[in-house]
Image (spheres, rainbow, N blue to C red):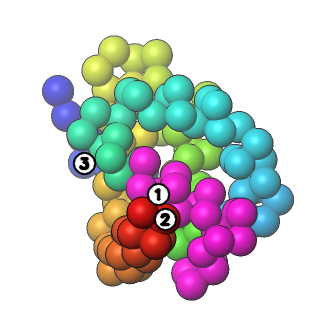
Amino acid sequence: MALSEDDKERVAASVENGAKNFTQEDLKKVMADSETAEEKSRSLGDQIETFKIMWALIQDYWNGDYKNVPWKLIAAIGFAVAYLVSLIDVIPDFIPFLGFMDDALVFAMTLAAFKSEIEEYKKWKALQRAKQD
């Protein structure tokens, strides 16, 4: 079962609008709800690894460890996480099979839009791990 083209367009519009209007206060709320975000991420299927790297990125940003990133990316990731934990989705999570497909699509779209910035973060993160060893 897959999302219809109409659903995909609605998700894309939601992501664009949500990221554009995402604020520091919204990020604060997302970071405060980390337990729910991590719990709900288990439903993302093949996008779970995307979630993990994006979650690590905004945590490092939030903690002040990684600031070499445009706010536009932080807003997009923050919105993706907020979308995941929200009860209000384009396709409600309680609908079997389709309910979490829009959540996964939001992460896939964010990854595609910011691939180079996320790759830079992954390099930085690997370097930080190497320094600890």
Residue drawn at the location 28% of the way across and 33% of the way down: 45
Q: Residue at x 78, y 54 (%)?
A: 28
Q: Nearer the viewer, residue 52 or 90?
A: 52
In this image, 55 relative to 122: left or right? right
Q: Residues within 10 Å of mark 3 (few under 14, many from 20)?
A: few
Secondary element under disc 3, as helix, strand or loop, is helix
**Residue at image mark 2:** 132
Q: Which residues are magenta?
A: 52-71
Amino acid type, mark 1: Met
In this view of the protein, can residue 79 be seen by the observer? yes
Closer to viewer: mark 3 or mark 2: 2
The numbered mark, 1 or 2, whose residue comes first in the sequence reads 1
Across and down, in percent, residue 50 comes to 35, 52
Judged left or right of residue 80, residue 91 is left
Residue in the picture at 33% in, 15% down: 96
SS for tag 1? helix
Please check the rendered image and state whether residue 102 is part of the magenta-colored stretch, yes or no: no
| 29 over 67 or under it: above or below | above
Q: Position of residue 41 (x, y in %)?
A: 45, 34
Principal SS element in the magenta part?
A: helix
Disc 2 marks a residue whose amino acid type is: Gln
Identify the residue position indicated by label 3 in the image. Answer: 5
Left/right of residue 18 with respect to residue 7 in the rendered view: right
